[in-house]
Structure formats: structure tokens, C-alpha cells
Amino acid sequence: MKVYGYQDASQFYDRVKDYLLFQEARHCLLLGICNSLIKNPKRYDSEPYLAAVEKDGNIIAVAIRTPPRKLLLSKMTDLVAVELIAEDLYKQKQKLPGVSSLPKEAEAFAQAWQNITGQSYKPDMQLRLHQLDTVEDVQQANGNLRLASISDRELLIDWIEAFYTEALGSNEENASRAVDAFLSQNSFYIWESEIPVSIAGGRLLASNSGWIGPVYTPPQYRKKGYASSCVAAVSQALLDKGCKSCYLFTDQANLTSNHIYQTIGYQAVDDWYDYSFSEK
């Protein structure tokens, strides 16, 4: 069993794609990162960590990190792989803020990282992954969907910063860079009811599926059905482009968003946990 690191995102994807696509829903976030790295290498501030653990020539685990974000881990066929990944990251002197993965993989890595570094860990967010294959008929809110343009840039930056603060508890992410990446790929949408009232990202993964997010509606425009209509319309737009499925994450604690997406046609696939690490 050995960890293989990669510098080139395309080479990395060519090696791991079959493993990731075999359970595409569970790996949609990793596939999305691969797609971003291939299409927009300057999307992230630092060089990514791209690694695969192999045993007898077969991949048993995949790990991706785009600093300063948390480590992302795939489904693993052998949890011993978390120890090898943790050791490899420690040797590279990477300072991890946390890990994000399926529950067993996330907890196993957090424990392995604690054993190596002495850092403590705690649950951060408990998310739920959803999949949609067909958009259900829902009552449409007033307004219509349109593709965001460069003229919307400042509004999008403000709203994405608000999203980071509300959903993640901080606005440390580079909102302007994220918005520019979405705009360059024509993958940001606005639900407009005379004025913009809701936004959603909708982009293709490194496969024939779609990814929805981030989704944000300012507080003054909520409970009017705008988010439901926006996400339903973006999901349909991706299906119309040839996607066979669309994926998104929800916060398990947010019962409203979970209900909204279920009425559109999203069905729960699996849980996804975040753990954060703290210094000794």
C-alpha cells in the first residue's frame, strides 16, 4: 500500500476518474474540484495536494486539498489508507484546518491526524448529499432565471461573502476569485423578480453530471419561493445540457433547505461530515 502524489491535475484525474466515477454521487465534490483545477488552474491560491493510495495496482483511496481549505477524502475500500495519507501530509508539513468526507472516513482520518500531531478535533458541520435525476413540478415564484454576467459581479461578490459568513461562519474564502471563476465558465445564475432576489451556481462536473451551489437568498427575500424556483430552474438547465444527475449538499440542521430541495426532486444519498483541527 503506497501513496502516490500528483502535480498535474489532468494526469491525476486520468488516474483516479474510474475510481471516483464508480460511486459518482459520493465523489461529486472531488470530481468538481478536479474539474476546476483542470479548467482553471489559477482558481486557488496555492498548489493543490493530489494523492491516491494504491494497493496491488488498484486505487483504494483518493485525497484532494486546495489550501487553505480542508482535506477532502473519497470513499475508501480500506481505512488503513487514512494513516498513510496523514503521514504523507505530515511529512510535507501541511497545516490542516480539518477534514471533510463520508462519516467513517472523516472520523478515521481525524483520529489518525490526532495520533500523529497531537492536535484535537471536533465535529464542525454535518452535511447531507442529495441527488436529482428529474425536476419535479413545483409552483414557480414570481420572476425568471437568467445567466449572471460581468455587470452582476459586485452584487455576486457581496452575496457570496454573506453566504460564506452565514453558512461557514467566516468570510475568509476569496469571494471575488470564486465569482470570477463562475462567471468565466458561465455557471452563475440569478433569479430575478424585477430585481435580483436569489442566486445559484450550476456547473458541470468532470463527468456528465451537474453540481449545484452555492445557493444564496438575502434574508429580506426569503420565504417567497425564490430559492426553490432558482434551484429547480438551474437544475433543469443542467439536465437540458445533457447531465444525467445533479448533486448538492445541505446542512442537516437546516430543515428548511432540506425540505425545499426534496420538493424539487432531490433525494438524500449519504451524509458528509466536517471535522476541524485545533492546535496543541
Image (cartoon, rainbow, N blue to C red):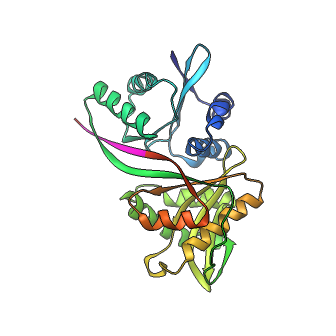
Position of 193 compared to 256: left or right? right
Q: Height in image: 48 above or below 160?
A: above
**For residue 215: magenta?**
no
Residue at image x 39%, y 64%? 166
Residue at image x 55%, y 56%? 177
Q: Assign the C terminus to one quadrant of the image.
A: top left
Position of 95 compared to 4: left or right? left
Q: Quadrant of residue 108?
A: top left
Q: Residue furthest bottom?
A: 194
Q: Which residues are magenta?
A: 273-279
Kindly report the secondary structure that dominates the magenta region of the rendered protein. Answer: strand
In the foreground, 248 or 161: 248
Residue 163 place in picture, x, y as percent:
45, 64
Q: Height in image: 115 above or below 103?
A: above
In the foreground, 139 or 248: 139
Q: Height in image: 273 above or below 259?
A: above
Residue 208 place in picture, x, y as percent:
73, 47
Residue 104 place in picture, x, y as percent:
41, 35
Q: Height in image: 176 above or below 77?
A: below
Residue 99 place in picture, x, y as percent:
41, 39
Residue at image x 49%, y 66%? 259
**For residue 277: magenta?**
yes
Q: Is residue 181 visible?
A: yes
In the foreground, 82 or 187: 82
Residue at image x 51%, y 16%? 2
Position of 18 compared to 268: left or right? right
Question: How many numbered tags mark residues here?
Answer: 0
